[in-house]
Amino acid sequence: MSVAVIIGLVVAAAVVFIVLRARAAEEVTVRIDQIPDVVSQLKATGQDSSFAVFLFMPEGKRAHDDEEKVNLQYSIEGGHVGLDWVLLAPQNVTDQNEIAAYIKDHGFAANMREENNVRYLRVEDGDIAGLGVKIATEFYHLNPAAEVDLIVESFDWKSGADSS
């Protein structure tokens, strides 16, 4: 093997390590009652394509991996923060119709959208942070103090900035 190939492999491995390490630093846990704080910081410091995803299991279920968890996402599109019910996670797909009805029953309008061949329900008007808390606590019966996984992308999340 030539020196150039070895150097190339080392550089590639270093890049992968750095990317994975940086990605892992963006995954934290927060309480459900901190959803409004995260959404507020997303709105204040984010830009188009910034997002926060809360991952959790419904009460009484156990996950074998992250793909089985509910994905409650907030993102910025066209300068507007919205709650996205992304139809990729199996539990999100299973609960789609019930969630759509729950959203409507609570006075919100959800629009079906599609981007990159992924469909999702999006809510942009009203107290969308409060709606997310209600989905987690009322629809999925989780305690407001329950910890959930949070993945953030392209905005500053500082847990010490929460108001609780």
Image (cartoon, rainbow, N blue to C red):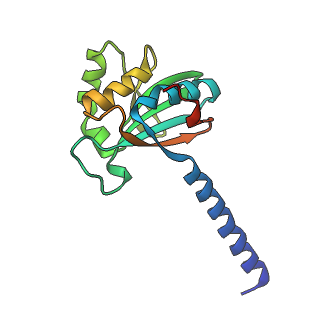
Q: Nearer the viewer, residue 87 or 72?
A: 72
Which residue is pictured at 66% across the width and 60% down the height? 18
Figure quadrant of residue 113: top left
The answer, for residue 76, to whether it is visible in the render is yes
Residue 160 lies, with reference to residue 77, above or below; the image says: below
The answer, for residue 111, to whether it is visible in the render is no
Q: Residue furthest left?
A: 60
Give percent across and percent down for residue 146: 35, 38
Which residue is pictured at 38% across the width and 27% down the height? 132
**Quadrant containing the N terminus in the rendered view:** bottom right
Give percent across and percent down for residue 83: 44, 26
Give percent across and percent down for residue 121: 38, 28
Q: Nearer the viewer, residue 76 or 158?
A: 158
Which residue is pictured at 58% across the width and 23% down the height? 78
Residue 131 lies, with reference to residue 140, above or below; the image says: above
Q: Residue furthest right?
A: 3
Q: Residue furthest front?
A: 164
Tally of marks? 0
Give percent across and percent down for residue 85: 38, 32
Residue 139 lies, with reference to residue 13, above or below; the image says: above
Figure quadrant of residue 156: top right
Which residue is pictured at 24% across the width and 39% down the height? 94
Q: Nearer the viewer, residue 143 or 84?
A: 143
